[in-house]
Image (cartoon, helix red, strand yellow):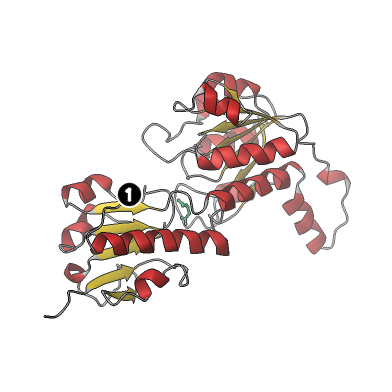
Amino acid sequence: TKKETFTVLVSDAMDKSGLKPVLESSLVNVVFESVLETKVPLDEVDALLIRSATTVTRDLLEKMTRLKIIGRAGVGVDNVDMDAATSHGVVVINAPDGNTISTAEHTFAMLASVVRNIPQANQSMKEGRWDRKAYQGAELFGKTLGIIGFGRIGAELASRARAFRMNVVAFDPFLTKTRAEKNHVTLADFNELLEKSDFITVHTPLTKETKGLLNRETLQKTKQGVYLLNCARGGIIDEVALYDSIKSGHVRGAAIDVFEDEPAKNHPLTTLDQVITTPHIAASTSEAQKNVAEQVAIEVLGYLEGKPAPHA
Ligand code: MLT
């Protein structure tokens, strides 16, 4: 009897070496095409692999009648309609730890860059200038970093900040005193963190609770001259409120990797000298992309073979 084969559609750019487990499996036929343009009939796809570019809507799920599992090669599943997936019996898994280090490192790089105006100074030299006065910065030493959302990435960032002798305060409703102590950070409530921090960085998923967490009202509670960082998800810091607070001089600078609407070409925040931006690349390292592709490949393949999916 002929063995059943499964169709796995890889809809976003993904690390091929990480996908080896599915590519080498005789059970699976892998197609690299966007789900919006694929020639494979949608009702023949068993598994869908995505990063953040593909949005999985209820409409799409209704057409994918054979779909069993969605593998998100990354952390955030905000680009998947989870209610619709559940109601269609589609399991959604992610790769929760494959890009932790890359994201923490990128956030730290953004922090060090924004406080010393490195991107702006670099740009000025490329434009032929030698302007030492314009780019005086500040030290991180002795300053307070407020981390909102103390999961894997928050904890890795904290240890890097401590290496630079910063004080770290963390707000996370799930953070216990023991875990805070173990990571040498001070537990704070939300308002306390806003009031004490010289730098505030968010590392939460985007949910109803975290959308606009830093908004016009809450930004007013922050220190004059605070810096803000978002390498998590667009929308956790309200973009219009951020723009206005920088214009007013209350917020001194910001480092932003993620946007409410991506791709975010010609975004208003990029017009401000005090803002440095990157195009959602915190997890874009060869190591992280290999890790997340491998994690979802192994788990999706296992699930198709009848094993449980631990990261559902
Ligand atoms: C994630 O949620 O893991 C990141 O946004 C990275 C990505 O989209 O690839």
Kindly identify the amino acid type of the residue bearing the numbered disc 1.
Answer: Pro
x then y, percent, for residue 263: 47, 58
In the displayed image of the protein, which residue is found farthest to the bottom?
Answer: 1
> Which residue appears at 76% of the width and 51% of the height?
118
> Which residue appears at 42% of the width and 36% of the height?
211
Vertical placement of residue 249 versus 287, above or below:
above
- Can residue 240 be seen by looking at this rendering? yes
In the depicted view, which residue is nearer to us: 282 or 25?
Answer: 25
144 vs 132, left or right, is left
In the depicted view, which residue is nearer to us: 52 or 91?
Answer: 91
Q: Is the residue marked by circle 1 packed among few (<14), some (14-19), or many (20+) residues within 10 Å?
A: few
> Which residue appears at 29% of the width and 56% of the height?
56
**Quadrant assignment for the N terminus:** bottom left
53 vs 273, left or right, is left
x then y, percent, for residue 257: 56, 50
Disc 1: which residue: 310
| Residue 242 in which image quadrant | top right
x then y, percent, for residue 283: 53, 55
x then y, percent, for residue 5: 21, 74
In the displayed image of the protein, which residue is found farthest to the left?
Answer: 1
In the depicted view, which residue is nearer to us: 255 or 217?
Answer: 255
189 vs 206, left or right, is right
Element assignment for label 1 = loop
Number of numbered discs: 1
- Can residue 275 be seen by looking at this rendering? no
> Which residue appears at 88% of the width and 44% of the height?
133
Q: Mark 1: is the Cβ under 8 angstroms from ligand 1?
A: no
In the depicted view, which residue is nearer to us: 51 or 46?
Answer: 46
180 vs 226, left or right, is left
